[in-house]
Amino acid sequence: MDFFDTLQTSVSIADQESITLTIPLAKEREMGVIAKRPIANAVWQNDSLPDNEYHQECWNRVQKLQYDFLVGEMSESVAKAISFTLLVEGVQTAIV
């Protein structure tokens, strides 16, 4: 639309669709990119499917992906998850 200066979109280890679909378009238009849910709500800390429907899709994705770094210290897994998001080319900031 050439009306907005920024794009706010989900981007995380569990939600990578925007990396190929929308972030490149935002870059072409010289828009800033704000990553929301950059640590996927840390859903891996749950041993079973969360009650909150909002978190269930991310939890299911993380279960399928089975990232090694999600096992162990929470601070380390969160650091790696946020690093993934912030290293996506085009992302300027994140809402944690």
Image (cartoon, grey):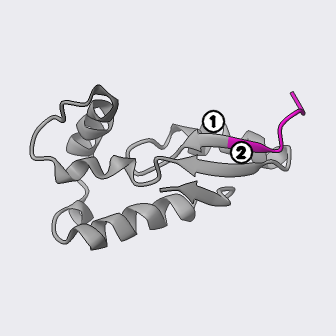
Residue at image point 26% right, 32% down: 56
* Amino acid at the residue labelled 1: Leu
Give the left or right position of residue 16, taking residue 58 as reference: right
Give the left or right position of residue 40, taking residue 93 as reference: left
* Numbered disc 2: secondary structure: helix
Residue 5 counted in the magenta span: yes
* Numbered disc 1: secondary structure: helix
Q: Say which of 94 and 87 sits in front.
A: 94
Whether tag 1 and tag 2 are in contact, CB under 8 A, the answer is yes
| Relative to 62, residue 2 above or below | above
The CA span between labels 1 and 2 is: 7 Å
* Amino acid at the residue labelled 2: Pro
Residue at image point 75% right, 40% down: 25
Please give the range of residues in magenta: 1-7
Residue at image point 65% right, 56% down: 91
Tell me if mark 1 has few (under 14), some (14-19) or many (20+) residues whose alpha carbon lies within 10 angstroms of its own.
Answer: few
Tell me if mark 2 has few (under 14), some (14-19) or many (20+) residues whose alpha carbon lies within 10 angstroms of its own.
Answer: some
Looking at the figure, which quarter contains the N terminus? top right
Give percent across and percent down for residue 17. Answer: 52, 37
- Secondary structure mostly seen in the magenta stretch: loop
Residue 27 counted in the magenta span: no
Q: Which residue is mark 1?
A: 21
Q: Which residue is mark 2?
A: 24
